[in-house]
Every structure is written in structure tokens, then in C-alpha cells.
Image (cartoon, rainbow, N blue to C red):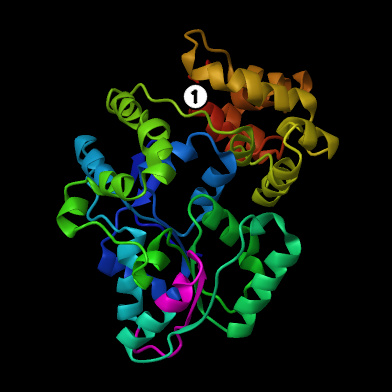
Amino acid sequence: MITHSSERVNLLNVYLDNLSKRELLSRLGDGGMVVTPNVDHLMKLQKDPEFHQIYRKSDYVVCDSQVLFYASRVLGKPIQEKISGSDLFPAFYQYYKDDLDVSIFLLGGVPGSAQTAKRRINQKVGREMVVDVYCPPFGFEHDEAENEKIVTLINRSQATVLAVGLGAPKQEKWIYKHKEKLPQVKTFLPIGATINFEAGFVPRSPRWVSEVGLEWMYRLMSEPHRLWKRYLIEDLPFGWLMIQQLLNLYQYNLPLGQLLQEADLLSFEQVESILAIQAQNRHRKFGELVVDRGWLEPTTLDFFAEQFPQLNKKRAQQPLGEYLKAAALLNERQIHDILLEQNRYGRRFGEIAVNKGWVPQGTVSLLLGNIKPVY
């Protein structure tokens, strides 16, 4: 189990590990999955619960944007260093070039780039560090036979590091879906366009452009037809959201699955299984699928989907027991018994409910974080 850095920085409900590149490289000797958020990722994460879930379960979340680097300073919680995927990957293979236990598989890039990147990287490090590569066809992520072929290729290579350059969120989702089938791989690096950079197929911006936070403009000018919508439309609300966070007005309503997971009412595996079904059947609602499986009562789903998001906006607050009853997690008799014990021993209502095994601790903590209970 990877331990996150103690000082994490919250940007729009994404928690970044405040690590230097050197610290991160040394930790990756133990493996882990790294994600590197930039402005585009943060905007996608506001709308994509599956992507957000992957971020929450990744081992390292580090800043891949000078814009985010500056934003952290404005918020008063400065990030130590920008660590973009395209900087991290070459730093990683140079750091571990003499460690013969570290071998790399490159997945992605434009046709021909991965093979060229393999040759150039191996020349730099002086050994066959990149052991194999594969450029999958368009739409491969929906082809189970193709995905199984890729898993077989990676396992056959015996690579201990998988670097995936497919673009976000496709690369992160592919890694997370298949990582359990790759027992040899310790380190997972989603690296975007880095394979193309390493091959010399796509030029990187000059360092000074990156350092002043204008790499996005350089990339837009280099690939306007592909990137204009991302930078000029999809990422435009970022500034307004950051102003909201600065003024303590930003609100992020957790997707229902994550909310129920925070409340200890569903496991991560249960949430992941429902999201997988939704990915194939988008007309099916999350709560409907949970109820169909008998995991929670419809009343509980309705409470967390409709009433819970409004709790911290209401001035009038009710006793904790009333909220738990509204969520069908306690009945009148249980509330009566808890109140009797509370009057007798002076213990907290939620503590008693948890100790009796009637309500999960996560549910009590989640509710208490959003209300000021009367008792």
C-alpha cells in the first residue's frame, strides 16, 4: 500500500502529492501508478466519475502543469515542483538505467513512434531497457480480443514498467482496467504524447515556454485541428472554478458511487463493477443497478442522490438520527434505544450507532461533515 505525502494540495477536488521529482523517482523503486494532472485533466475530472475514481485510487498524483503550479500558490498551498509526464519518463529511465530489474514496455504513440522511441532510449541508457513496444489500432479499447492480445504481449515481455501514451483519460482507464492482469508490472506511467516526443515525431515546446505556463499555446499552434476544442472550449471554465475555490464558493458533488463508497455503504469493487456496466449500457442509472443487485434499499439511494447534496446548504438542521432514518439506515426503535443509552452514559449518538453495528462509521462521518446535528 502506497502512502501519500502528508501535505497534499487540493485543486478542484483533486488531491496532488506535494513531492519533488527526486522524491517521486526514489519512491517508484517500490512501484505504483502515477497520474499527472494538468488543466485538461481537471476539467475532465469534473464530469467523468470513472476517471475521478481512478485518480482517487492512484498511488501518486503529481502536478503536470505550470498553470496548476501557479494556481497552488494563489491558493496559499504551493506545490514544490511541476512534474509533467514528458519530463518524468526520461528522468525515470535515466534514474534506473543501471538497475537491471527495471525494464519497460511502451504502449501507444503514432504508428512507428514507439519502435523509434525504443531504439533511441536504449541508445541513451546503453542497454535494452525498453524490451518491447506496441501501437494499438484505433478503437482497440472496445475490442476484448485486442486487449487480451496486448496483455499477452506485455506479460510475455516480462517488463516491470508499463508506459502508456494513449491520451487521457483513455490511457488511465486502460491501465486501471487491466493492471491486475499484469503481475510482472510494478510501475504504471500514463505519459500522453511522450512516446512521440521521445521518437522525435512531435517537437516539444522550448523549456522557457513550459516554465512560463504557455506550453498549451505552443501545442495548440503545433496541432490546431486536434487541440483547438480542448484548449479554447473545454478548458476555458478552469479560471472561473479556481476563483470559486479561492473564495470558498467551489462545490464538487461527489458522483453517487463515490459518495456511497465514502459512506462505507458500497465497496470500491462494487462501485467499479457498476461503472463497468454503465460504460456498456449508458442508459442504466447507477442507483437502479445497485438496487437491482440488492446492495442497498431504494430509500437509501434516494437520500444520498437527492437529499444529501443539499444538507450543507440548509440552515435548519435535524438530529443525526433523523437523517439516518430518512436514509433507511435506522428505524424508530433503534433511535429510541440509542437515545436511552446516550442519556445513561453520555456518549455520542453516532458513536453508539456505529458500535452497535447498525450504521457504518463512514456514513456517520460523512453526515457530521455536512450538518450540525442537534444531538
For the record, the magenta segment spans: 97-117
Mark 1, residue position? 370
Q: Is residue 300 left or right of residue 73?
A: right
Figure check: 167 above or below 152: above
Figure check: 96 above or below 54: below
Say which quadrant the C terminus sits in: top right
Residue 87 in picture, x, y percent from top left = 30, 64
Q: Nearer the viewer, residue 131 or 69?
A: 131
Residue 134 at least partly seen: yes
Figure check: 65 above or below 263: below
Helix, strand, or loop for circle 1?
loop
> At x 35% / y 32%, what residue is drawn?
238
Residue type at mark 1 is: Asn
Q: Nearer the viewer, residue 214 or 175?
A: 214
> At x 48% / y 65%, what residue is drawn?
109
Name the quadrant containing residue 29. bottom left
Q: Is residue 86 magenta?
A: no
Q: Is residue 104 magenta?
A: yes
Residue 296 in picture, x, y percent from top left = 77, 34
Residue 346 at least partly seen: no
Q: Is residue 199 left or right of residue 347?
A: left
Q: Is residue 273 left or right of residue 33?
A: right
Name the quadrant containing residue 9. top left
Residue 4 in picture, x, y percent from top left = 40, 57
> At x 43% / y 85%, what residue is drawn?
129
